Amino acid sequence: MTTQINSNYLEKYAEDYSRIVCGQFFSGKQYMTGQDIVQLTNSAQVNFFVIKRLFELWQEELGKLKSSPYFDYRDITVHEALTEFMNVLSRRIKIESEQLQPLLKTAVRQAVQVATDPVSFYQNEISKAPTGEINEFLKENRKYYKWHDQVVSFLIDKAGFGHDESAYLRAIAANFQAIEDSLESVNLLLATLGDVKPFDLDTYLGKDSSAPTPVVETHSEPTKEAESKSSFFDQVEAPAPVSRDVTPEPVKIVEVAPEPVRVAPVNHGNGSANGLDAYHLKAKFETLSYKGMKGILGELAESVAINQRFMFTKELFDGNADLLKHALKSIDKCDSFDEAIGLVNSRYVEELNWEIDSEPVQEFLLLVYRKFEV
């Protein structure tokens, strides 16, 4: 079936999104740093596309310097000094609102494209690579690809493709067809934009019916010696390390584990017939005695223990930490347990195929209950 993309809607949406984000951030600050951009919105893909564009501009500046015919940039001393200068420059990113807004607008458009049409997006990325350097280009840029990166990342260091661009283009299309069913839901990816402005996918895809509509981990500061030898763009590449030698033992938050809450066929207006029912969840949780059970201090987004975050990310949110963070922030904005369960039903239960009787789901719901009802 042919889809008629509504480019005017995307253009207006990206304009509004960038204006809202810049208005919120710059209401209290004059400049934005590189680390501010990493954590700017709940959509890691939008944030990293902004950084990717800055990286491209950074490389363009380096190219301009090297293009001068009057100096020997091949000299090792000059090369080392220039590299250190460019690295220091990259760690001093300082952007005002009028410079950031067009970068953010472009990043939003790109994020929507990679979510809805990853084949075209990644094929276009291939076309930007210097002749004969596609593999190196993908290696250098893969840290900026947060959505549907499986479509292209399998090609990195793949023997047999050589320098033939057409072979890469064909491989991307073929690989997408093979893994399409395992890719993350487009609706879930675009939901991470919703905290700023809901994205209407049906309008964008040119459909008549309307449809209802996830931070990078913080790292310790690098030493001064390490700073002088690396750029900001190198530092944003590696995710927070996860130890694979020792698995943290889950924190026991209950003395007696609650039995799974079975969904009753009666709907009390705060759940769906095929999802969770807030009325029965409350009835179940409030009858159990919990050791030292207290309400959540502050916000869920800040209060969930690291081992629980690890479990929820792996078991409930398809390994997507940004999506978990977005869910917790969305729940924090709810005014009641009933409203929170309605949100969980509409966005996550069916979309992520949750087993509602499973231990991870029950533990997640218990935290939500503690926030609103204890």
Image: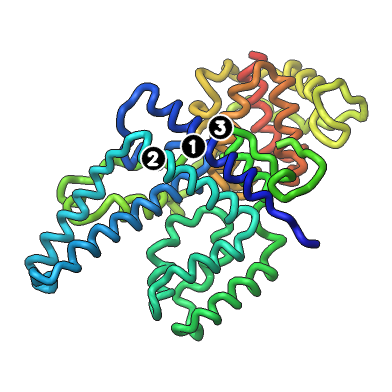
Q: Give the residue at x 39% y 40%.
A: 100
Residue 196: mark: 3
Q: Earlier in the sequence, mark 3 or mark 2?
A: 2
- Which numbered disc, 3 or 1, marks the residue that appears first in the sequence? 1
Which residue is nearer to you in this view: 287 or 65?
Answer: 65
Marks 2 & 1, CB-CB < 8 Å contact: yes
Give the residue type at disc 3: Val
Tell me the quarter of the image containing the C terminus. top right
Residue kind at label 2, given as amino acid type:
Leu
Q: Which mark is residue 100?
A: 2
Question: Decide: marks 3, 2 in contact (CB < 8 A)?
Answer: no
- In the displayed structure, 69 sits above or below 321; it is below
* Residue 35 - label: none
- Within 10 Å of disc 1 (Cα), the crowding (few <14, some 14-19, many 20+) is many
Where is residue 181, by image quadrant?
Answer: bottom right
Q: Residue at x 58, y 56 (%)?
A: 114
Residue identifier under label 1: 18
Q: Earlier in the sequence, mark 2 or mark 1?
A: 1
- Say which quadrant the N terminus sits in: bottom right
Q: Secondary structure at mark 1?
A: helix
Q: Where is residue 39 shown, x and y percent of the image?
A: 42, 38
Q: Position of residue 185 (x, y in %)?
A: 68, 50
Identity of the residue furthest to the right in this view: 265
- Disc 3 versus disc 1: distance between alpha carbons? 9 Å
Query: Spatial distance from mark 2 to mark 1, Cα to Cα?
Result: 8 Å
Report the side of 132 relative to 2 (left or right). left
The local secondary structure at tag 3 comes to loop
